[in-house]
Amino acid sequence: MNVAVLASGTGSNLQALIDASARHLLGPARLVVVGVNVPGCGALARAQAARLPAFVIDHRDYSSRGAFDQALIEALRHHAVELVVLAGFMRILTPRFLDAFRTRVINVHPSLLPAFPGVNSQAQAFRHGVRISGCSVHFVEDGVDSGPVIAQTAVPVLDDDDEERLRLRILAEEHKLLPSVVRAIAEGRVSVEGRRVRVQAQAPIRVTPSES
Ligand code: GRF
């Protein structure tokens, strides 16, 4: 399955996918292209260091969201993309984009959705005083961070936490959760019924004793 990653920032989640791919932990998922909307961002440098095809489509060069999304669609189609992973991609996509990749767009978000959607979720959770936060990977629909949740990892808020420590512990969990979901989708283990998503467990590895 041809996978594209769209990012705007540091790109540590992109790096987690690159590393998982190098360790053959993405199953049949193949990273075929990275797209960024911020020239010079860390994600672009990581893509180049990994020798992945990459493109920059700067939203400021487009007069409307629709025109920006159309440029993205064309760039992704050029690479025959089948799954789009939003990994810190800070643009809201229009229905035009989502229709082009229907049920094939996922996003990683640093909270246990539906709590704390939008930006600065880790700080929102910390300031709210929740005892457990975490991260979610979900299908993207119209609306911000609102599509069906595929998988989540809980991260406890510790008594001596601050916003930054909590953010980093959540980020470390994102780096495990996102590759595992990409693999599950590529292996055909994810099904959706309305808002409910089912992820079948990976088949156990069978070890056949060698005859000697
Ligand atoms: C992550 O926390 C992700 O959940 C959020 O933006 C952050 C991106 O981090 N949407 P990185 O660019 O992958 O390091």
Image (cartoon, helix red, strand yellow):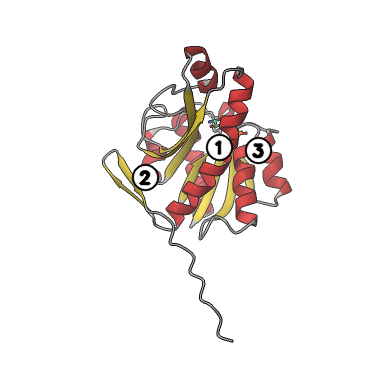
Q: Quadrant of ligand 1?
A: top right
Give the mark toward the camera: 3 or 1: 1
* Residue located 59% across and 49% down the image: 33
Q: CA distance from mark 3 to mark 2?
A: 24 Å
Q: Residue at x 59, y 25 (%)?
A: 167
Is residue 159 or residue 162 the one in the foreground?
Answer: 159
Tell me which label, 1 or 2, sits earlier in the chain.
2
**SS at badge 1:** helix
Instruction: Determine crowd level at label 1: few under 14, some 14-19, many 20+ residues with C-alpha closer than 10 A.
Output: some
The x and y percentages for residue 10 are: 66, 33
Label 3 residue SS: helix
Q: Where is residue 189 shown, x and y percent of the image?
A: 39, 55
Sequence-earlier tag: 3 or 2: 3
What is the CA distance from the residue labelled 3 to the residue labelled 1?
Answer: 19 Å
Residue where numbered disc 2 is placed: 103
Image-based side of 48 in relation to 6, left or right: right
The residue where tag 1 is placed is 173
Q: Quadrant of residue 42?
A: top right
Q: Nearer the viewer, residue 184 or 142?
A: 184
Q: Which mark is residue 13?
A: none
Q: Does the rendering let one see residue 57?
A: no
How many angstroms separate mark 1 from mark 2 (CA)?
24 Å
Tag 3: amino acid = Ala
Please tell me how many numbered marks the rendered image carries. Answer: 3
Q: Which residue is farthest right?
A: 49
Residue kind at label 2, given as amino acid type: Thr
Which residue in the protein does label 3 denote? 43
The kind of residue on which mark 1 rests is: Glu
Q: Within 8 Å of ligand 1, the CB of disc 3? A: yes
Is the residue marked 2 within 8 Å of ligand 1, measured from its CB?
no
Q: How far from the left and from the top, in percent, is residue 122?
A: 53, 22
